[in-house]
Amino acid sequence: MAEREQHRIIAEAQAPGKLYIAGEYAVVEHGHPAILVAVNRMLTVRVTGHGENPGEGALSGDVPGNTPDESSAAASLPLEPRTAGSIRSQGHDEAATTWHRDAHGRCVPDEERPGAAYLVAAIQCVEELARAAGIGLRVFDIDVTSDLDDVSGRKYGLGSSAAVTVAAMRALLRFYGLESAFEPLEQYKMAFAIACRAGNVGSGGDLAASLFGGCIRFCSPDRDWVGQRLDDTALPELIRMSWPDLSVTRLPVFGSDSVTVSPAALRLLVGWTGKPASTADLVTNVQHHSTDERERRYREFLEHSDRCVDALCEALAQSDMAAVREHIAQARELLHGLSSLTGTLIETPRLTALVETAIAHGAAAKSSGAGGGDCGIAIIGVESDMAATETAGFIDSVGGATADESDAESAESAVSAIFQDWRLAGIEPLDLAVCAPLAKAPQWQTKRSSRKDDHVRLALQQHEQEPANAFDDVRFIHHALCGMSVNRVDTATTVCGARWELPFYINAMTGGSQRTGSINAALARAAQATGIAIASGSQHAALRDPELAATFTAIREQSQGFVFANVGPTVTPQQAVQAVTMLNANALQVHVNLAQEIVMPEGNRDFSGWPQHIREIIAASPVPVVVKEVGFGMSRRSVEQLAALGARTVDVSGRGGTDFAAIENSRRSAREYGYLDGWGQSTVLCLLDCCGFGTSGESSLGSVDILASGGVRNPLDVVKALALGAKAVGVSGHFLRVLEDCGESGLVDEINAWAEQLRSLMALLGASTVADLQHTDLLLGGTTLEQATLLGVDAAALAHRSA
């Protein structure tokens, strides 16, 4: 210790600037994507330690678990004990201040300086993590140097606030020996929390670019949710939680970790108009205008932007220059429409000149960032329409591919021509390079994975509120003296030959992308913690692309309980068995989704082979099979057909919850299938139709067990479904909404609360078992009564079952 006290610790980290390629306005709304690149203009933060902080215990040099990389990042120099630290930023006197620790050991600036807000917040956040890890705090100086701006002080709009946040966070994590303790996405959440506490955070896309480097597709988290969690959740717990809508994926483009499919990579050129613009001011202006009568058009803009960004991701990943031009032009046109809608000047005359000049040379071009000034970008490739500009003015990625000699000569000629035209228009070409990837991020997937993310986003929108549905047409007749002790209630049921302690489960939802894989893992952990069963979403994506298997196997990795695999009737029996094996599943769901496929732009159109495929899958499956709808309902006739095919368990999955026809229609540009919104029968009507409530009182379904799902909002809906004949009840949309709003711990609390309330409701109804609920008296009303009567249901008999 005495020897260490003669040395001080120095830790240093860098973070790059950023540029937006597309989606820069839509991304400010959570869940909407944008494309960004990190550029090789760097900001550097150095942390220099000065002795042990009084009363705080260990020196940072004593921190356990320092890795060799972290040790090398923190050099040792002679130490002079200090009791106060300082913050200095080269060329920014407004950020200079000193700081001390208050009685609680918290970093407090001696003078509030707005320019130091991100650095102070970084110190406070990282040291909150250090305290949680039992690491003693130290006093230190922070020094910031930057080449993000010109030496003359001109600001290029490369994201200095984000870069200083990320660099300071990383330097401090290294200083305390914590960098290796957190995954890159957890570090991103930490940086976002720092920016929130500093009082100024936008979409967070600039933070993601500075932290991950290279080229990324980014969806912003729900800032309101994060803000609420910052108030009531400890930071170490918060950064481990799943954040609603947050997604960061790597795009293999611009030579940055790329796998090209054509002889040469795409290239990027950047010009500066000479006028700095405030992204925050411009975005605030757009959001202000979007709250009036223009709301509908603004929402349309967001939806069109989402499709444009993902189409551009596809084009960039394939190095398809023609498609890149098309979608960059579309992105530019969307910004023109937004500018007109809000009265906000996004593309200035100089930006127009920059863009039109690049287009004339065969490039795709648009403004970058908020517009109103700052930078414009152009993208070109070797196969550009005009050979002289095939590699013009490119941002040559660090570590990227090199062109042959003729291409290099052509590039030099094109660079000179474009730069000359830009300079004549008062535009400064910037000598930049795309930064190599700095942190690991999942590779962006193709349209199929994007569709999975679309499904989650649109389903969550549908479940922002839970409106009335057919469950409200069912009421129990209250008998004042039929109650019993809650302690005598047994909530167990049997499904697919297995005993479940609770008669409800997490039904099929998702999988096939980074975000949905995280959702599956979180759902599975909640299932494990509460002891309920869980079903996977359709595993078709993993059957087509084994690299996506991890987004589904996360379910079994996190849950040792009852797990359903999931396929559709288009797979082979061998693939169905493969899906079961993938999850070591206890049962297999086969989803039938004809209405969804009809509306889905890329959906199937031939359903004639489905019955035979279902028969073959049932015969081949090594585990019990459940055939289920996806929210449109099963008629008695359909269940009878399935019974003849060998099905022994059917989930009627009726209307009332997630509407996949509406979701798929939202993904169509013309929304031409809007008239199918609400297609199908409600879950309640399906149960009445299928479970032997006809005037004859007889069921023709033999030994088929019925499960129910669709529109289940609360424990009373569960009890109603069980009383109508369901063996168990699946819940999807409500649990997904709780997970997004409240995190994993909130979902666990919700499931446990449902279990407790279920027992109370059964006691209220005098039902000691799930089977007893089928002897309770029910009243039907509303549309459900009218429709059930037409189907031959004896509503009067339902009201007198306990007699």
Image (tube, helix red, strand yellow):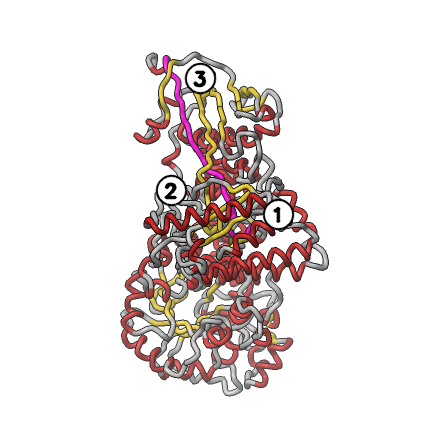
Q: Is 24 placed above or below 145 here?
A: below
Which numbered disc, 2 or 1, marks the residue that appears first in the sequence? Answer: 1
Amino acid carrying label 1: it is Arg
> For the residues carrying marks 2 and 1, which lies nearer the camera in this image?
1
Residue depicted at x 51% and y 63%:
762
Name the residue nearer the viewer: 453 or 300.
300
Which numbered disc, 3 or 1, marks the residue that appears first in the sequence? Answer: 3
Q: Which residue is mark 3?
A: 50
Q: Is residue 58 left or right of residue 695?
A: left
Was residue 12 drawn as part of the magenta stretch in this picture?
yes
Task: Tell me where the magenta segment starts and ends, as one range.
Answer: 6-24
Q: Is 587 placed above or below 222 here?
A: below
- In terms of secondary structure, where does tag 3 sit? strand
Magenta stretch: dominant secondary structure: strand
State the separation of the CA atoms marked 2 and 1.
29 Å
Q: Are marks 2 and 1 in contact (CB under 8 Å)?
A: no
Amino acid carrying label 2: it is Val
Q: Is residue 63 left or right of residue 771?
A: left
> For the residues carrying marks 2 and 3, which lies nearer the camera in this image?
2
Question: How dense is the environment of label 3, judged by Cα within 10 Å: few (below 14), some, or many (20 and up)?
Answer: many
